């Protein structure tokens, strides 16, 4: 529950320290005394939008601190632990409002964003104010109110997640279909190019090897005649090697007669013959190298020119042709894989659509049950509010073809003010007085299902009195049995049921130079006097005091 509220330099409040008890706390005061300032300050501490106009005139900043005493297992502590914020003892929310419009937020003295503060405070306090009527009358909010009443958080999350998954798959499927459709348009060209390149079968480094081979063959053709002539001279009919061999043999036969004279000549002839044999072998090798089939040169040139022509056609280097062939092959394979991906995505999308439909139907069934329960709760409140013959209904319509994060239902609050009359939208059917009471019954019913430990009601009794005001007091007291309830009221019948009573007043200070809002905690005597004032007005009579005492005793 809200344990303490500290306000400093906010609008007409200089400094204010309030301690709250459990049960029903009532705040009363004259119109303009500053009750709305108090609630604005609390809202600021809970993460409401800041405004530099909230800072008291002449000050650079204002501050609001709200301290909560919560059960150890409250969800707020788990949320704090996830963000590494100290979660032991009290939970303290602090908001600093600067005069230039900026704000700073703190949780247990650790700086947080306003969004984090709002998310945390949502589980701490529910504020039901006069402005709630706009939301209660807006049909676009009715579905969310039914979900809140039914506690459909998990079902709503499951439906929203299923919708997100389905839409993501539908988007992926559409994108893949578009990509494959574009790929199909280029598929014929890719297949033709791939077939052409596959038939040519270019190899890495082939151009350089062919060019070198062609150059060698062309050079060999030019020197082949001279090499053949050299070969004929070395080993043909006019070859000198046989002549030298014959001379060497004759000299060797004369070696015995004059060895000293002949041996050097024989040795020289042997050396010459060996050199000639080496030369002959080299020439024969060169001749063999030059000996090629002219058709081979032609084939080499044809292959080289084919490679270079293909490279020009596709505007790439010859050495890039193998990679280009692989690229076209990948495109063809990717087209096939894309068609397979489409089939897989279609299957996944079908499964996701079924999952979404199941989640949406489960949520729809839960909404129907919650709607009937809400109808029962609101209709149970109507007799005490002098609407015995009226009926409240939640009209649910389901469109199974609709795919939305919120599911497939539309909800609208309708009323029937008299038996036999036609039910219609709350705003159109109910009169002004009836509308206020219908809205009150709704607020009380919705609040009874709330999960926050503190409920705040801001003048929900506006425009009612007598028995209806007393019924409101009874219902607030009933709510206060399970949660802390703070209520701003002008109805003495409501104020009489409080366990704690604050009176808000506006006094002149600084010798009348300015006014400030103050909050007085009333004891039993002062409480009776305040209720008497609410009954009688400016002049409190004995009858008013007696009536106030009677109201308090009746409420007790």
Image: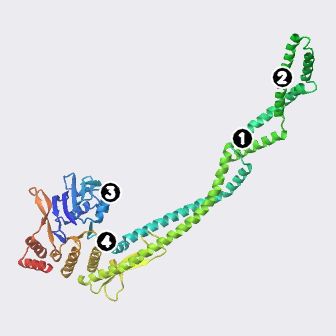
Badge nearest the viewer, 1 or 4: 1
Q: Mark 1 sits on what residue?
A: 207
x and y, in percent, of residue 306 in the image? 75, 45
Quarter of image, res 189: bottom right
Q: Label 2's element?
A: helix
Upstream in sequence: badge 4 or badge 2: 4
Numbered circle sitting on residue 274: 2
Q: Residue at x 91, y 19 (%)?
A: 249
Q: What residue sits 27% from the left and 62% below the top?
A: 46
Image side of residue 86 versus residue 530, left or right = right
Tell me which label, 1 or 4, sits earlier in the chain: 4
Of the pair 50 and 266, the residue shown nearer to us = 266
Q: Secondary structure at mark 1?
A: helix
The quadrant of the image that shows the C terminus is bottom left
Q: Which mark is residue 134?
A: 4
Mark 3 vs mark 1, CA separation in Å = 66 Å
Describe residue 62's horizontal placement relative to residue 424 as left or right.
left
Instruction: Examine the rendering and report whether any part of residue 237 can be seen.
Output: yes
Q: CA distance from mark 2 to mark 1?
A: 42 Å
- Compare residues 204 and 530 and report the one nearer the observer: 204
**Quadrant that contains the N terminus:** bottom left
Binning the other alpha carbons within 10 Å of mark 3 as few (below 14), some (14 to 19) or many (20 upward) gives few
Of mark 3 and mark 4, the one earlier in the sequence is: 3
Mark 2 or mark 1: which is in front? Answer: 2
User: Where in the figure is residue 78, as x and y percent of width and height?
Assistant: 31, 62
């Amino acid at each position: 529950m809200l344990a303490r509220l500290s306000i400093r330099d906010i609008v007409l409040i200089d400094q204010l320290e309030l301690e709250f008890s459990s049960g029903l706390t009532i705040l009363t005061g004259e119109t303009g005394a500053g009750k709305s300032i108090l609630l604005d300050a609390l809202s600021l501490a809970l993460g409401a939008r800041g405004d530099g106009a909230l800072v008291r005139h002449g000050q650079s900043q204002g501050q609001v601190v709200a301290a909560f005493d919560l059960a150890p297992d409250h969800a707020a502590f788990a949320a704090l632990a996830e963000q590494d914020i100290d979660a032991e003892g009290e939970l303290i929310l602090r908001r600093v409002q600067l005069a230039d419009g900026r704000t700073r937020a703190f949780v247990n003295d650790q700086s947080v964003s306003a969004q984090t503060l709002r998310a945390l405070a949502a589980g701490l306090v529910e504020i039901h104010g006069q402005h709630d009527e706009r939301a209660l009358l807006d049909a676009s909010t009715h579905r969310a109110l039914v979900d809140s009443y039914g506690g459909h958080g998990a079902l709503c999350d499951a439906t929203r997640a299923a919708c997100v998954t389905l839409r993501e798959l539908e988007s992926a499927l559409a994108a893949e279909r578009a990509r494959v459709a574009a790929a199909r348009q280029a598929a014929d060209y890719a297949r033709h190019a791939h077939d052409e390149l596959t038939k040519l079968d270019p190899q890495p480094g082939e151009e350089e090897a062919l060019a070198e081979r062609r150059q060698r063959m062309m050079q060999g053709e030019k020197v082949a005649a001279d090499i053949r002539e050299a070969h004929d001279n070395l080993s043909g009919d006019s070859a000198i090697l046989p002549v030298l061999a014959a001379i060497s043999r004759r000299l060797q036969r004369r070696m015995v007669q004059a060895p000293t004279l002949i041996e050097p000549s024989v040795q020289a002839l042997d050396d010459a013959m060996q050199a000639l044999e080496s030369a002959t072998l080299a020439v024969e090798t060169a001749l063999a190298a030059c000996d090629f089939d002219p058709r081979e040169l032609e084939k080499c040139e044809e292959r080289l020119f084919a490679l270079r022509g293909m490279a020009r056609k596709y505007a790439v280097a010859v050495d890039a042709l193998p990679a280009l062939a692989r690229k076209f092959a990948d495109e063809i394979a990717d087209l096939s894989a894309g068609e397979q991906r489409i089939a897989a995505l279609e299957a996944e999308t079908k499964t996701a659509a079924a999952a979404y439909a199941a989640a949406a139907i489960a949520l729809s069934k839960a909404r129907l049950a919650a709607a009937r329960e809400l109808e029962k709760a609101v209709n149970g409140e109507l007799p005490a509010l002098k609407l015995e013959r009226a009926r409240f209904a939640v009209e649910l319509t389901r469109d199974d073809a609709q795919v939305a994060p919120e599911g497939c239902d539309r909800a609208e609050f309708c009323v029937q003010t008299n038996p036999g009359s036609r039910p219609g939208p709350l705003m159109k059917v109910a009169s002004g007085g009836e509308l206020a009471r219908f809205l009150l019954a709704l607020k009380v019913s919705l609040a009874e299902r709330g999960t926050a430990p503190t409920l705040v009601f801001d003048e929900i009794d506006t425009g009612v009195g007598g028995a209806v005001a007393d019924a409101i007091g009874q219902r607030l007291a009933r709510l206060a049995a399970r949660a802390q309830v703070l209520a701003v009221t002008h109805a003495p019948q409501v104020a009489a049921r409080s366990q704690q009573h604050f009176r808000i007043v506006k006094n002149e200070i600084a010798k009348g130079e300015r006014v400030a809002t103050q909050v007085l905690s009333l004891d039993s005597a002062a409480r009776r006097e305040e209720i008497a004032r609410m009954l009688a007005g400016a002049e409190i009579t004995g009858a008013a005091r007696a009536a106030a005492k009677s109201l308090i005793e009746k409420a007790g």
